[in-house]
Amino acid sequence: MTVERNNLMRLAQTIPFTPVQLFAGEEVTVYRLEESSPLNLDKSISSWSQCGRAAMIQVLSREKMDGGLRRAMKVVCTWSENDALKLGQVFIVKSFLPVVVQTWQKIFKEDTVLHLCLREIQQQRAAQKLIHTFNQVKPHTIPYTPSTD
């Protein structure tokens, strides 16, 4: 018994070993914005799917990617319930600055921070649809083509 323990200790000291952290990171809930008619955006209605599945993300980089209203960081998916996200896929996660949340909460008193974020994403999607529709019907005399890029 002592010999086996000594051999294990010797192996542990001589073989490089990097522990694998399963489920590393922070647990998040995944929401999906879906379109009723993805191929016909000007007639499509956006709605949140009720999947609400869990995933784990781990911060890769805290490099400066902040904007005027939000902070952003690069993360990787380390675990996902029912393939809500792809393992190893890299994402940019954005969060609103506290002053923005405080301002919103003065206007939308009953809404949580989550609802405020979901509302903002829906507003951005509505703007994308308006740009798409405009580009479909704009006269050729207008040289500029708005884009969401």
Image (spheres, rainbow, N blue to C red):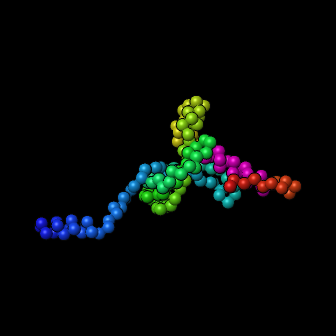
Query: Residue farthest to the front?
Result: 14
* Residue drawn at the location 58% of the way across and 30% of the way down: 106
| Residue 48 place in picture, x, y as percent | 56, 49
| Residue 76 place in picture, x, y as percent | 48, 57
Residue 4 in the figure: left or right of residue 16: left
Depth order, front residue of 58/61: 61
Specify whether residue 109 is in view.
yes
Vertical order, 97 against 132 (above or below): above
* Residue drawn at the location 47% of the way across and 62% of the way down: 88
The quadrant the C terminus occupies is bottom right
The quadrant the N terminus occupies is bottom left
Location of residue 97 (image quadrant): top right
Q: Which residues are magenta?
A: 120-137
* Residue drawn at the location 42% of the way across and 52% of the way down: 25
| Residue 134 place in picture, x, y as percent | 77, 52
Query: Residue farthest to the left?
Result: 1
Residue 26 in the figure: left or right of residue 92: left
| Residue 113 place in picture, x, y as percent | 53, 39
Depth order, front residue of 54/23: 23
Location of residue 68 (image quadrant): top right
Residue 28 in the figure: left or right of residue 141: left
